[in-house]
Amino acid sequence: MAKTPAAPSSNDAPSEGTVLNGVPTGGASPKGRATPTRAEQEAARKRPLVPDTKEAKARAKADLAAQREKARVGMAAGDPRYLPARDQGAQRKFVRDYVDAGWHLGEAVMPAMVLVILATFLPVAAIQYYAFVGLWIFILFVIGDMILTSINVKRAVKQKFGADKIEKGLGWYASMRTVQMRFLRLPKAQVKRGQKPA
């Protein structure tokens, strides 16, 4: 006696998208598109979220320029948020104010060199010779002023902050600032000539 075949269990049912005898089964319609390859999936992941357009590039460039300008202005004004590491700290600010409050021979080094260069164009050998000699004598005085400024700055920092709390390199920091023309110094001078630094 022939037996009626048992109904297929839920576990034996064909999955969605299975084709049986040329007919799709599974109760739901197929997805209707091919599965993307691995290369296509990786390319989709690498695609930027923001479209790479000329407008986006121009906007990013303008934002970067604005940030740089803000940092430049902040540094020139002595804003601690924009100062490099070599200019950070209360002692460095005191040294800058100390130097900016006085007159220094080093400020005239660049103008003196320009005069000597101009003197070399004159056809008189004596003028050229004495111009070079005078420049070297002037540079010796500038070096002496740098040394004196370094010593005086260290003494002033000791009196203000205490001998055991002095940072290294303050003398060199001060002497290098003396050879810069006042309007070219960065951060810019925050005190007037003759004004006692706070």
Image (spheres, helix red, strand yellow):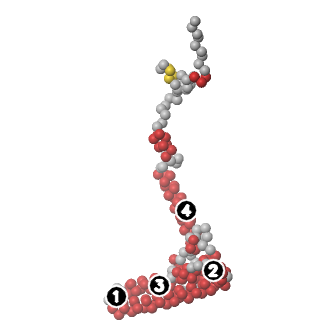
Residue type, label 2: Ile
Q: Quadrant location of residue 98?
A: bottom right
The residue that label 3 is drawn on is 109
110 relative to 125 in the view: left or right: right
In terms of secondary structure, where does tag 4 sit? helix
Q: What type is the residue that disc 1 sits on?
A: Leu
Q: Secondary structure at mark 2?
A: loop
Give how far across and how far down residue 113 sits, in percent: 43, 84
Between the C-alphas of marks 4 and 3, the distance is: 34 Å
Residue picked out by circle 4: 67
Where residue 89 sits, quadrant-wise, is bottom right
Indicate which label's residue lies in the foreground, 2 or 4: 2
In this view, the residue farthest toward the left is: 123
Disc 1 packing (10 Å; few <14; some 14–19; many ≥20)? few
Amino acid type of disc 4?
Gln
| Residue 166: image tag | 2
Disc 1 target residue: 122
